Amino acid sequence: MSAIKSGVKRVLTLFTSRRAWVRQIAVAGLAGATAWAVGDQLVVNGGVVAAIVCTLSIRISLHKSLREGFGQIVGTAIGASVALTAVSLFDFGFISVGITIIMCAVVARALHLGEVASINVPVTALIVIGPGLSESTALHRLISTLIGAGIAIFFSYFSHHKTPIGRSLDQIRRVSVKAATLLATMSEGVATGYTQKDAGNWLASARLLNEEIPELRAQSVEARGHARWFPTARKDEAEELYIQGIALEHTVVEIRTIARTLFDSAVSGGIADSTQKAIAVALSAASYAISSKFEDIGPSHDDSHQSATTDAREASAALAETLIADAKDVDQEQIVRGISMAANIDLIADSLDQNSPALRDVMTPDEPAAAKVLRISVRGQLVRLASRVSRRIRAILRK
């Protein structure tokens, strides 16, 4: 009996420990069921198509589902047109299906559709031209597709109990805690004498930490994009969070560089005893500066962290002075590596204080072009088209 209870408890724990995931799949299931019910009520046999499209379109956030929904609508218009043309010429079969898929890929490429919309084009086309196709059936499937996309957009609002800004705050806090903890671990290791194996573990942890940068940036981009059009969102707060996300990204990159420097030093024989304490103090100060900066991040965040970044700069300067003083007695490569770490800590302090031009004066790409519905905006494509037409006209007139 106790074994059964233990097994049931373990199964329940698998779900209770993943509440965010459970919420998302529950919302997705409810959205699909609703799409089926609404589609079946409004369109003859439209429930299945609406449920399929809803499942394809719904994502973990309202912002992304709007993008997915728009891509589904674009895919519906393009895919259905291509599919109906192919079927009218060759009837439904091997040739029409092949031509539909190929032509959809060509049209998606010509319109610079992103990866999501490009996939939706042939998928929607095949749904529309499925068995039992007739003019009325095709129209019903088109309408069902739009119903499914619309319901996915509506239900995606309930996928999370927090707004995109709230999720960005959580993401920044989580990554900053890992960054500060890693620096503190490296500080303790340097102070007590670390081995090449220890340095290898730090470098591996730093690499894993850097792998979280794309997710961190994507979340801050989503928060900023959501704030631009959602009436209750605060645009200023979203923009500030975006800058803080970039600052944390720069910080994480510097931590990886420090970990690599410590590893290279271990390979070359280790750090000199005279500089060991100064490096440990500088790393500890940088760790505390990160904790102080991001511990109370949010609307009520103040500038109390600046004293911590000042301490980090002072520890970095002390490290540089120690290295210069020991220049005659320490290997030159070790001096260079130590100065490099001092510079890394200065850059971390600048990023935390957000006073570096690299944060605000350099444009950071929002997201990869492949993740966008339109790789090139409608306006950009119209400008390109107008330019090509004008060039052709001028060439004809010259002749």
Image (cartoon, helix red, strand yellow):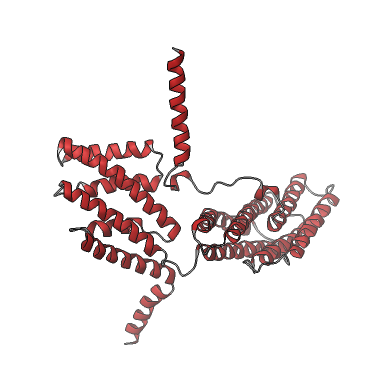
Quarter assignment of residue 160: bottom left
Give the quarter of the figure containing the N terminus.
bottom left
Query: Of all residues shown, which one is farthest toward the bottom?
Result: 1
Question: Closest to the observer: 376 or 395?
Answer: 395
Question: In the visual, does 324 lie left or right of 270?
Answer: right
- Above or below, comparing residue 308 to residue 88 in the picture: below
Question: In the visual, does 375 lie left or right of 337?
Answer: left
- Above or below, comparing residue 370 to residue 192 in the picture: above
Query: Of all residues shown, which one is farthest toward the top?
Result: 399
Image coords of residue 90 (percent x, y): 16, 36
Image coords of residue 51 (percent x, y): 27, 60
Image coords of residue 224 (percent x, y): 54, 56
Question: In the visual, does 261 lie left or right of 73?
Answer: right
Q: Can residue 195 be seen here?
A: yes
Image coords of residue 359 (percent x, y): 65, 50
* Figure label count: 0
What residue is shown at x 48% (from left), y 34% (from top)? 383
Quarter assignment of residue 274: bottom right
What residue is shown at x 83% (from left), y 53% (from top)? 321
Question: Closest to the observer: 231 or 274?
Answer: 231
Quarter assignment of residue 301: bottom right
Question: Closest to the observer: 224 or 277?
Answer: 224
Q: Can residue 273 be seen here?
A: no
Give the quarter of the figure containing the C terminus.
top left
